Image (spheres, rainbow, N blue to C red):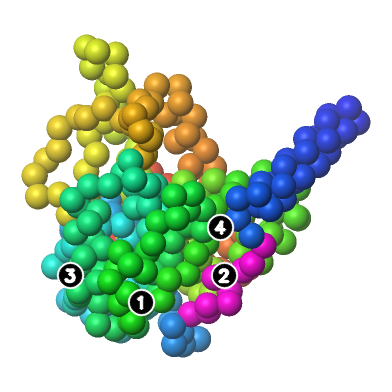
Amino acid sequence: MRLSEKIISALRNTFESALFFATMAAKEDFRNHIGRAGALDMLPTKRLAILGNGPSLADQMPQLIADRHWEKADMMAVNFFALSEEFATIKPKYYILSDPMFFRQAGKSPRTEALYEALSQRVEWPMILYVQYYNPEKFDYAAAIGHNPNIRIVPFHTTLYKGFRNIEFWCYDRGLGSGNFGTVVQNGEFIGMLIGYKTIELYGVDHTLLEGLMVDDENRLCRVQSHYYDKQPADPKPIYFNATNPPRPYSMYTYLAETAELFRGHEVLRDYAAHRGVRIINHTRGSMIDAYERQPMP
């Protein structure tokens, strides 16, 4: 790298770092909420198994239940898993909600209300619910889950950091920032590392985000979005930015750019896992993630 390029890089990283700390001061705080809360009865030999919501989880779930995998690894669930039949069997210790539709008025729907009702009524075991610290509408998670005494609510930070790498990992070690962890599973990996797990298993993380893309006759970018809990094949639907009012559609450019950043986030997590001595194993057959060790289930 030439001297001029080094100078430009240093200036850019300095600006990005200063912008990050200014944004954190304005929107969030500088507390390591995840580290303070710790883990739930974690044993040194335990692994963390994160259950994504990709369609492949429907094939993996029977084997996980047959093997009673929750006795071998601590389970982390995401999004609408609490509405599934398997929820009460697996009894996940950790649960994550990160999508704006779970805390913005524009994303309110009967399905999100049913999710909070399920967390309120079905959780009869100790569980930590992780939610975004950034909550501009002051959504009351405790009230939404009926003040269930079995659930402890812990916030996590999401402000993007893209400056100096050594400062980046220093921030992550203290529970601050995000490497554009744009999916709930990525937030789960980050949280799992912060609370001390040394092996993290991924299930149902297909990430087939480029599959089924099309542009309809109204020039709207559409995609078939399928999840393991879907009962019937889905039709292509327009893609909108989450929980904006009025709904704001993606263009092909913005969607591909955001998807590229999301996969960059997996590479950041890969490097951060190496920094912390953590092994991330992707057990999802056909997953588009190429950043981690792969051991697909049969």
Q: Secondary structure at mark 3?
A: loop
Residue closest to the eye, 265 or 25? 25
Quote the CA–CA distance across marks 3 and 4.
29 Å
Mark in front: 2 vs 3: 2
Q: Quadrant of the N terminus?
A: top right
- Residue 157's tag is 4
* Residue at image point 62% right, 69% down: 32
Q: Which residue is mark 1?
A: 151
Q: Position of residue 116 (x, y in %)?
A: 26, 63
Q: Secondary structure at mark 2?
A: helix
Q: Which residue is mark 3?
A: 86
Q: Secondary structure at mark 4?
A: loop
Residue 95, quarter of the rendered image: bottom left
Q: Amino acid at mark 1?
A: Ile
Q: Crowding at label 4, few (<14), some or many (≥20) Cα neighbours within 10 Å?
A: many
Mark in front: 3 vs 4: 4
Q: Quadrant of the C terminus?
A: bottom left
Dots 2 and 4: beta carbons under 8 Å? yes
Q: Amino acid at mark 2?
A: His
Quote the CA–CA distance across marks 1 and 4.
19 Å
Q: Amino acid at mark 3?
A: Glu
Q: Position of residue 73 (x, y in %)?
A: 36, 78
Q: Is residue 237 visible?
A: yes
Quote the CA–CA distance across marks 2 and 4.
9 Å
The magenta segment is 30-39
**Upstream in sequence: badge 1 or badge 2:** 2
